Image (cartoon, coloured by chain):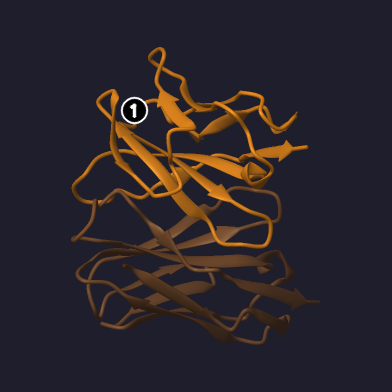
Chain colours: A brown, B orange
C-alpha cells in the first residue's frame, strides 16, 4: 500500500524567509508525484506533477524536486498569500493508476 | 479558465437519509473522481469513473455509495443511508486522459453534515 508522509506538519515563516517542505513516499512503482495547495474550506489546487527522480518544476516562488524516496517543495521568499496547506500525493503502477494517495499536508503560515 | 463545480456547498441531513452530491466536471475531461476529507484528516480516494462505469474504488466505497453520470455534464455521488461518520467534505475531481499529464482538478467541495 502506498504511503505518503509529509513534514513538518506546520511551518511558520516570516515573509521573505525561504524554506522547504518534505514529502517522503513509499510506492511499488511511482507513476507520478503531485503537489497541491489547499486553502481552508476549499478543494486542492493542482501545482505540479513530477514523474522521475531528478525532475524539477517551478512556478513563481515554488520549486518542486523529486528523488527516489522523497520530494521537496522549496518556497523562496514567501509572501503572506502563500499561506495554505500544501499536499503531496502519489499514484503508482501497481494499483489502478487513477487512485491518488495523499499525505496529511504541511500547513504553512507566512507572517508579514 | 474551466473549473469543476459542485452543488450544494453545504448539505445537512439526518442519519439514515439518502443524499446526492452533484458535480460538473471540466467539459473535455474523461475521468471523474470522488474524494472525501474528514475534518482535520487527509484527503481520501473513494472512486474513479470512466466510460460510464467505475474503474476503481477504495475500501471506503461500500454498497452504501453509488456514482452516476446521468447526462453529458453531471457526475453524482449518492449515499443511500447516511451515517454520522459520513460527515466530511466531499470533493469531485476530473482529469483529461491517461497518458502524459493526468493531473486531477478538484472542485470546491460539498460539506456534508449528518446529524
Which residue lies at the image location 43% right of the left edge and 41% below the top edge? Answer: B61
Q: Left or right? Give the position of B61 relative to B5.
A: left
Mark 1 Cα shell of 10 Å, populated few (<14), some (14-19), many (≥20) = few
Which residue lies at the image location 71% right of the left edge and 32% below the top edge? Answer: B15
Q: What is the x, y in percent for residue A46?
A: 47, 54
Which residue lies at the image location 60% right of the left edge and 58% below the top edge? Answer: A38
* The quarter of the displayed image where residue B5 is located: top right
Residue toward you, B109 or A3: A3
Q: Left or right? Give the position of B89 relative to B79.
A: right
Name the residue beneath numbered marker 1.
B28
| Residue at the extreme top of the image, as rendered | B71
Q: Is residue A23 visible?
A: yes
Q: What is the x, y in percent for residue A28?
A: 21, 71
Which residue lies at the image location 51% right of the left edge and 34% below the top edge? Answer: B4
Q: What is the x, y in percent for residue B17?
A: 66, 24
Q: Is residue B33 above or below residue A26?
A: above
Q: Is residue A22 above or below residue A106?
A: below
Q: What is the x, y in percent for residue A9?
A: 62, 79
Amino acid at each position: 500500500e502506498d504511503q505518503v508522509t509529509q513534514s513538518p506538519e506546520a511551518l511558520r515563516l516570516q515573509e521573505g524567509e525561504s524554506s522547504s517542505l518534505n514529502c517522503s513516499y513509499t510506492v511499488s512503482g511511482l507513476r507520478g508525484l503531485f503537489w497541491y495547495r489547499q486553502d481552508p474550506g476549499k478543494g486542492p489546487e493542482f501545482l505540479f506533477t513530477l514523474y522521475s527522480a531528478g525532475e524539477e518544476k517551478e512556478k513563481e516562488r515554488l520549486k518542486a524536486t523529486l528523488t527516489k524516496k522523497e520530494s521537496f517543495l522549496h518556497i523562496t521568499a514567501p509572501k503572506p498569500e502563500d499561506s495554505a496547506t500544501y499536499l503531496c500525493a502519489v499514484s503508482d503502477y501497481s494499483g489502478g493508476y487513477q487512485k491518488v494517495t495523499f499525505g496529511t499536508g504541511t500547513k504553512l503560515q507566512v507572517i508579514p | 479558465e474551466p473549473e469543476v463545480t459542485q452543488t450544494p456547498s453545504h448539505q445537512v441531513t439526518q442519519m439514515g437519509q439518502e443524499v446526492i452530491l452533484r458535480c460538473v466536471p471540466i467539459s473535455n475531461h474523461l475521468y471523474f473522481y470522488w474524494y472525501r476529507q474528514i475534518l482535520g484528516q487527509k484527503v481520501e480516494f473513494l472512486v474513479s469513473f470512466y466510460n460510464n462505469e467505475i474503474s476503481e474504488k477504495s475500501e471506503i466505497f461500500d454498497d452504501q455509495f453509488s456514482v452516476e453520470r446521468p447526462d453529458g455534464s453531471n457526475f453524482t455521488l449518492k449515499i443511500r443511508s447516511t451515517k454520522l461518520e459520513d460527515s466530511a467534505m466531499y470533493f469531485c475531481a476530473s482529469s483529461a486522459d491517461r497518458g502524459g499529464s493526468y493531473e486531477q482538478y478538484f472542485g470546491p467541495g460539498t460539506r456534508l453534515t449528518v446529524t
